Amino acid sequence: MNIRPRLQFLSQETVERVVGEAYDLLADPGVRVHSARALRLLADHGAKVDFQTRVASIPANMARLAVETVPSSFHLYHANGQPAVHYGDDDVQFDPGSAAIEILDHGANHQREPVTADCVRFVKLTEGLDALDAVATSLICTDVPQEIGDLYRLYLVLLYSQKPIVTGAFAVDTWSVMKDLLVAAAGSEEALAEKPRAVFDVCPSPPLLWSDITCENLMDCAQYRIPAELVSMPLSGATGPATLLGSIVQHAAENLSGITIHQLVNPGAPIVWGGSPAAFDMRTGTTPMGAIETIMIDCAYNQVGKHLGLPTHAYLGMSDAKVVDTQCGFESGIGAMLGALAGVNMISGPGMLNFESCFSLEKLVIDAEIVGMAKRAVAGITARETPLALDLMRQVGHAGDFLTTTHTRRWFREELFIPSAVVDRDFRRNWEAKGGLDTAARAHQRVNEVVAAYEPKELPPEISRELEAITLRAAQAAGLDRLPERN
């Protein structure tokens, strides 16, 4: 029997204080909601709503009842219909970070805007990295109109990936088109609801505010039972309290308000307690995603979500470095490892640099090695045999040759995480003979190898045609006559 290592930052008493204060905030000062539909819904169910200021005072009991109807777990499905990602319990999974507006080429010091070919290459790479459990719509292509930037990246992911998808919409209308794309891939709205392939990020604005777009996205997800992932993001000392616990309270209140609205639309629809809060660097005015305090807030709010019996998510494993360097490695490693030890169900972040704005394919393959190590750590130490070592040690004696034993052949592959060639563990003479490459250079080699090995799994022609037709209609409405070449 093995013990799963578990990281906790808060006492049970503190968790309960966080939840109690969050419920109190829902009533006073309440939540500002810029969706008339949501305000009417809240008012119809007993919230005190000022339609002029758009502030809703949500009674604690209303929010508590909403939390009780949220499923404690659910699955996202692979394109073949098999469950592939489990939100719930202490299961830990990873997907790339999302919504990068820049990409960093190997060896470059300057970022550039991504285009279709970059997104296709990214999806093929992610498909070949087994450590990543899901793909994300990570790059915003700039060779299509901004109005379809969200749905176009989902279109490309559906064409080239079989994995579950973490995505999000930038407008009310485009959410509907993205739903249509997912329905086309699933076969029907009912099939999509039964076996959801994607989860949508929905982001309240700090402090305690829902924009019309995100609130409508939230309610649409509930209506169609497509999983929603709350991404509350207080910035400690800027758009939230400077104390870490204060920001955790604000995060909880914002998420509880989202859960209340969501469950009023459709009780029992799946929703995730997630977020992307950050510490605020008072020297530079930036929001460091690799700061240890950012990571601590994420792990702590995850603990609050688990206390409420909810599936959890966090943006972790990212770096604020501008290139793939030492800072990039240690920030990403600390975040991914602590998030995994905290039992966050879905950790989004691999591949991301520069305050969650830039993507690097080389960082993604390095992060995949970090993810492999993090998963190995949370698997814990297992008692493989009884006795643990007594018989073996007596058998081998003082000769010390364990390499030739059946015991070693039987267990070493299960005990050790075997990294790819991105991680150098060779003798120096062999490293030099292979070119003396540093980590970034080895990662670049791995990117090329994985992308070259990509084997397309053809979609049925009628689905491909429908996906293209839906996307092309949206593109033409935005002023684009035809979709960009994908190679």
Image (tube, rainbow, N blue to C red):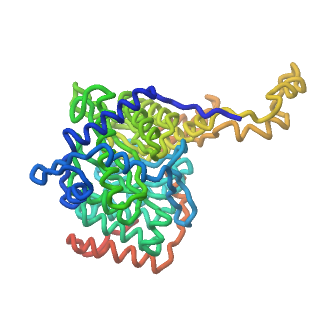
- The front one of 301 and 458 is 301
Residue 354 visible at all: no
Quarter of the image with the C terminus in it = bottom left
Q: In this rendering, would 442 be left or right of 41?
A: right
Quarter of the image with the N terminus in it = top right
Residue 481 place in picture, x, y as percent: 25, 75
Residue 482 place in picture, x, y as percent: 29, 74
**Residue shown at 48% from the left, 49% from the top:** 72
Q: Quadrant of residue 120?
A: bottom left
- The front one of 230 and 484 is 230
| Residue at far top of view | 398
Decide: is 72 above or below 177. above
Q: In this rendering, would 341 be left or right of 428?
A: left
Q: In this rendering, would 397 be left or right of 421?
A: right
Residue 297 place in picture, x, y as percent: 37, 32
| Residue at far bottom of view | 462
**Residue shown at 49% from the left, 45% from the top:** 345
Q: Quadrant of residue 329?
A: top left
Residue 265 visible at all: yes
Decide: is 1 above or below 352. above
Residue 186 place in picture, x, y as percent: 47, 71
